[in-house]
Each structure stands twice: as structure tokens, then as C-alpha cells.
Amino acid sequence: MKRTIDDLAVFGGPAAFLNTVTVGRPSMGDRERFESRMAWVLNNEWLTNSGPLVSEFETAVAEIAGVRHCVATSNATVGLQLAMHAAGVRGEVIMPAMTFAATPHAASWIGLEPVFCDVDPVTGLIDPDDVKRRITERTGAVVGVHLWGQVAPVEELDRLAHDHGLVMLYDAAHALGCTRDDRPAGSFGDAEVFSFHATKVVTSFEGGALVTDDAALAARARSMHNFGLGQGGRVEHVGTNAKMSEASAAMGLTSLDAFAEVCEHNRRNHELYAEELRGVKGLRLHELDLEERSNYQYVIVSVDPAHTGIDRDEIIRVLAAEQVVAKPYFSPPCHLMEPYRTETPQRIESAEWLAAQVVALPTGPGVSAEDIRRICDVLRLVVADGEHVARRLTAARNAPS
Ligand SMILES: Cc1ncc(COP(=O)(O)O)c(C=O)c1O
């Protein structure tokens, strides 16, 4: 245990961890099950094109989302594009600035125009009032984002989209297994898209899924994700190749087998972080609504430098020296990234404020209670004398090498 700031690894003390503890380590499930699924794939030589494992994965994801249709994709970015294409979106697409670059890029890449709106300063979720202010005659759709294992304010957004005749889609990359008023993410709007990227709570290496209750939209998306081929194998319209492979589905199913256990482990981790950080000045653990279900995949802490004396990026630096990889989320927010910042220079207040403050801390099945206690020991030590730590970091940076 570190007693003084001289014990911090960034100032020459031993690192708190021998092996790196990082945000977003994959939850792969049982290795033998994966290997036996892969053996089956290889023995049958059915590697892609609507294979049985992809079908099984689609059925399982649709069930979690509480919808009738699921189209598994090679990733969520292309899944969002399919959703926009299949829903016939044109013109401007309103979305929160506080999201991963994939959300606006998905729209830009297919000729649509992202329009960024603000978020709630506490939850980070898209602000429906700001969406409303940004609707014009050119608006074609709204893409809500279910951030950090919380579901966006879907009642207001779905109503708004309905009243203005807009397509309503959700980027549900963070939200598998999460609910709002007991209804699962995946069941809102015209369609939603999950990600099964390696960092997500369920992984298929790379992967995504479009889920919807709209049979016609699902059929268009299914055809479009396979080069625009129709039932009879003839090309009916322009499409792309966004299919999930059987190897990905084998990983997805194996990761899904462990999903409930991983969520429970994450929930306990979240609780422990809350206990360890309770009352620590300037650090606020982002709370989740206990009435709802979450995958607890994101442990988000806001750093208020007015109280810690040290900012978020310096804390990330201190943790990195201890072999703890913590991540800013999403910094900068999308409207301050190229090309959007040059195309439409603007300020989006709460998104900017949050993006400068929040950090994600490690969780997941590979992160134990002891790991969390050690990470929090370091955090408490740093913010107890934050100004001093910050001054020494600045001096170390400016010292001649
Ligand atoms: C909010 C959000 N949307 C979309 C994506 C893109 O997902 P994928 O990597 O599966 O394309 C990600 C993450 O990686 C994300 O965090």
C-alpha cells in the first residue's frame, strides 16, 4: 500500500500492478466452449453467409432486446449505416455530441449530415429539449445514444420523432441488457444497433446487430447487408457486405453464455467502487438507477479539479504509471473533432464540460475486488494532495532530459 505521494510509480515508486489492468478487456466466456464451436464451424466448412451460429446468435440477441427481428453485422458502425439506409433517412441526422466518432461517421460516410446536440450534464444522455431546438425541414432522423449502460430518454425522443415525422434510431453500442421502465434497450424507436466489439460487455471479436420490430425494415436491412440480394438470390438494390461470420458468432454465443455472470460481477465491482470512493472530495462516481437493469460495463468517474486540485488527464497519467489503463470518454466530444469542428464551429456546453471531466475505470470479469481497492487507494492518495501531485508532474515534464 502506498502511504505518501513519493510511493506513486509516476514519481519512482513501484507500480501498484505487475500486469496491466485496463478498461475494456474482452469478456470471452469459456474457452473450451468457444473452441468446440469453432471446431464445429471448421468441420462443417460453413464459414459465413447466414450460417447456423449467426442465426442462433441473432435469435439470442433479439430475445434480450425483446424484439422479433435481428440482423447480425460485422460491426455496429456499418449496422448504423444499414439502419439509416433501410429506414430511408435523408438530410440531417441529430445526435448527441457526447458519443463515439462511429455515430457521426456512420452518417457522414453515407452522405448524411450529423447535427450535434447537447446532453444532460449529470447522466450524459441526449437532451430531448435540445434535439427539438435543432429540428429543421432538413432533419431526417434522430439517433439517440444509450450511454454507459443507461438507456436514453426514449419516451420523449420517440414522441418527438413521431410528432415531427422523423426516423428514430438508437445507437445501443453500450446498452445490451439495459432497461428503461423495465423495457430493454433494443426495443425502442424504429431500430437500434448493438456493438459486439472486443471492448463491449458481449464480444464477437468485431460485430454488431440491428434489432427492430419492423419486419419490412428488417428485411431491407438483411438484404442490404448481403449486397442487396433478395429472396431469389437476385440483386434488388444497392447493398454492402456487412455480414457477421460464423467465427464471430461462435465467439458471440460463447460470450453471451457468460453474459449474466459478467453483469453480476460488474454490478459488484460498481458497488465496491461506490464504497471506496464515497466521500472522496472532487471524485463523483456516476450512479446508475437501481430500479433499472444495467450491464455495469462502464465505471465512470467525474473529476472536479476545483476540489481535487488535479485534472482528469493528470490522474490518468498517474494511473498509467501504476499499470492501470483508465480512459477519457469521449474526449474531445464529436463536434470538436475533425471534420465537424471545421465544418460547423460551435460550443456545446454540457458535452464539453463532461468530456473534460469523466474517466472510465477498469471493470469486467478480469478485475477483482482487490484490484479495485488498490486502484482506489491510488486515487485517494492522489486527490488528498492533488495540487502538490499536479505541481510535481508539471515540474517533471518541464525538467531538462
Ligand atoms: C457509442 C458507440 N457507438 C458506436 C460504436 C461503434 O461500434 P463498432 O466498433 O462495433 O463499430 C462504439 C464503439 O466502439 C460506441 O462506443
Image (tube, helix red, strand yellow):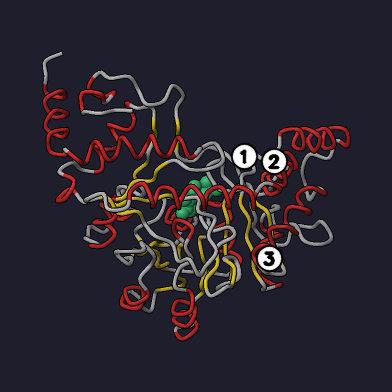
- Amino acid under label 2? Met
Where 189 falls versus 282 (above or below)?
A: below
Q: Which mark is residue 205?
A: 1
Instruction: Residue 344 in the image: state x and y as whole percent.
Output: 26, 59
Q: Which mark is residue 72?
A: none
User: In the visual, does 91 lie left or right of 216?
Assistant: left
Residue at the spot 37% in from the left edge and 26% down from the top edge = 16
Residue at the spot 48% in from the left edge and 66% down from the top edge = 290
Q: Are marks 3 and 2 in contact (CB under 8 Å)?
A: no
Tell me the mark number nearer the camera, choosing from 3 and 1.
Answer: 1
Instruction: Residue 170 in the image: state x and y as whole percent.
Output: 51, 65
Residue density around tag 1, few if under 14, some if 14–19, many if 20 or more, within 10 Å: many
Identify the secondary structure beneath mark 1.
loop
Instruction: Residue 53 in the image: state x and y as whole percent.
Output: 79, 47
Marks 3/1: CA distance? 25 Å
Residue at far bottom of view: 163
Q: Earlier in the sequence, mark 3 or mark 1?
A: 1
Q: Which residue is mark 3?
A: 220
Marks 3/2: CA distance? 26 Å
Instruction: Residue 97 in the image: state x and y as whole percent.
Output: 34, 59
User: In the visual, does 87 lie left or right of 341?
Assistant: right
Residue closest to the eye, 154 or 211: 154
User: In the visual, does 388 lie left or right of 300?
Assistant: left
Q: Which residue is mark 2?
A: 251
Residue density around tag 2, few if under 14, some if 14–19, many if 20 or more, within 10 Å: many
Q: Is residue 129 visible?
A: yes
